[in-house]
Amino acid sequence: MKTRNVVIIGDGMVGSTLAYTLLMDNTVQGISIVDVNKEKAEGDALDLIHGMPFVSPKNVKAGTYADIEHARIVVITAGVAQKEGETRIDLLKRNLKVFDSIIASMKPYIHKELIVLVVTNPVDILTYYTYKKLGIPSYRVIGSGTVLDTARLKSIISEETQVDPRNIHTYILGEHGDSEVAAWSVTNIGGLTLEQFCTDENNSKVKDSFHLGKLHEKVKNAAYEIIKKKGSTYYAVGLAVNKIIKTILSDTSSILTVSTYITDEFDGEISDFYFSLPAVVGARGIEKVLHLKYSVEEYKGLIKSGRTLKALINEIENELK
């Protein structure tokens, strides 16, 4: 299959923003937008089509699940919003019902080269759920994970050090959520460790552990701050997901902190769930997971994050049967 077609399931702010970022890029050939609100999907498709004279030609349409048969990637952004006072597990169970409908509609059109990319939150649990329900190899079911969180950390370090964020190498790992871990021990700027760079540049506060903790808190609270100010996040999410799609379609073997299936990591402490570790992503999906040497504190944090996700999986075990 040589197609570069992408099907987006869910035409909310994230789905429509992703469609726009894909329109602006040269990687994708076709964009099909699927939503329960067909008129909204048709309106967005028409709006995008009218911009075609300014970009490379693409086939853009409001589509159906049948378009999956000719797609390389399916992106799921559909889901329900959290109600005031609603617990995380209650939100998860409502989204599981949405995913049951989506997965049932997808199944007749699944083919051996299709890659499924889950963006809806809680992304790690919903990616795991999608993998279990679809029954396709885990390397072809990917969550957007902490790709955005990692980008946020790079941006924050860039502000502190006045260095191009593209020259800052760092990771947010584990759950896409409150138990995520900042991998300071493997962070480097232009080949220098963070400590070396900050010493050389006489910027000692950045390497201070208390200050690093504050930077990590900014990452964890970024979405809450944006939601408080404007209602939802979608621009940076759209760009993060676009990066994952480009990596797959162009087979660039980029290292991304996508949510991936964990079988036996950290000396067997945690297994059988999804969360984010640095992974090589290519045309097949997840090519390999990188095993880095983390600090003891980070190592323990990742195990704790994994157990947090396993506890949530245990709460929905009846739905997985």
Image (cartoon, rainbow, N blue to C red):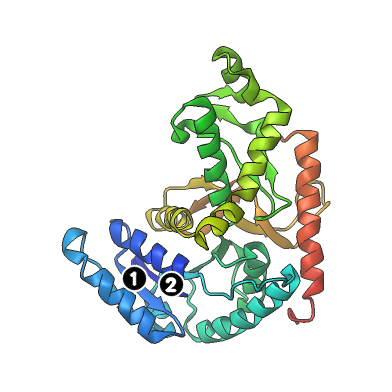
Classify residue 93 as left or right of residue 69: right
- Position in image of residue 21 (x %, y %): 35, 59
The mark nearer the N terminus, 1 or 2, is: 2
Q: Quadrant of the C terminus?
A: bottom right
Q: Which sits in the foreground, 100 or 17?
A: 17
Residue hosting label 2? 8
| Residue at position x 37%, y 79% in the image | 41
Q: Choose top left, top right, bottom left or bottom right for residue 89.
A: bottom right
Mark 1 in CB contact with mark 2 (< 8 angstroms): yes
Determine which of the numbered discs, if any, sits on residue 31 in the image. 1
Q: Quadrant of the N terminus?
A: bottom left
Please tell me whether residue 172 is drawn above or below residue 123 in the rendered image.
above
Per the image, label 2 sits on a secondary structure element best described as strand
- Position in image of residue 263 (x %, y %): 73, 58
Q: Choose top left, top right, bottom left or bottom right for residue 69.
A: bottom left
Instruction: Calculate the distance from the C-alpha at mark 1 to the C-alpha at mark 2.
Output: 7 Å
Q: Which sits in the foreground, 242 or 261?
A: 242
Please tell me whether residue 187 is drawn above or below residue 20 in the rendered image.
above
